[in-house]
Amino acid sequence: METFKNAMSYPNHEQKSVLDHLYGTLLVLAPAGTGKTRIMADRLAAVIANGMPAEKTLGVTFTNRD
């Protein structure tokens, strides 16, 4: 049986472009619920797997709730 994760076809085109950007800084702006935090965690894992020391990485999320 197909899992929910597979059914979501992760990553989509926009998310894949974030995952493919392994060098330099990157700002991702998107509405709530679009997977920004998950993509950030997966991108950090990919950057580290490609040789960047973990102590030289920084991931920041921000929520502005009025």
Image (tube, grey):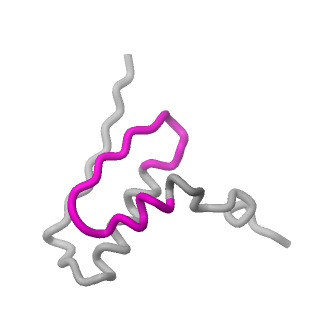
Give the left or right position of residue 49, taking residue 15 as reference.
Answer: left
Q: Residue at x 31, y 37 (%)?
A: 62
Principal secondary structure, stretch drawn in magenta: loop
Furthest residue toward right: 1
Numbered range of the magenta stretch: 16-36
Give the left or right position of residue 11, taking residue 42 as reference.
Answer: right
Q: Quadrant of the C terminus?
A: top left
Q: Please identify the quarter of the rendering in which residue 18 is found.
A: bottom left
Q: Position of residue 49 (x, y in %)?
A: 33, 82
* Numbered disc total: 0
Look at the image and say whether residue 8 sits in the magenta stretch: no
Q: Give above or below for 22 relative to 65.
A: below
Furthest residue toward left: 56
Q: Residue at x 42, y 64 (%)?
A: 19
Q: Please identify the quarter of the rendering in which residue 55 is found.
A: bottom left
Q: Residue at x 36, y 45 (%)?
A: 28
Give the left or right position of residue 9, taking residue 44 as reference.
Answer: right
Q: Quadrant of the N terminus?
A: bottom right
Q: Position of residue 38 (x, y in %)?
A: 46, 56
Q: Nearer the viewer, residue 1 or 30?
A: 30
Q: Residue at x 56, y 56 (%)?
A: 13
Q: Give above or below for 44 relative to 64.
A: below
Q: Position of residue 2 (x, y in %)?
A: 80, 69
Q: Position of residue 21 (x, y in %)?
A: 35, 64
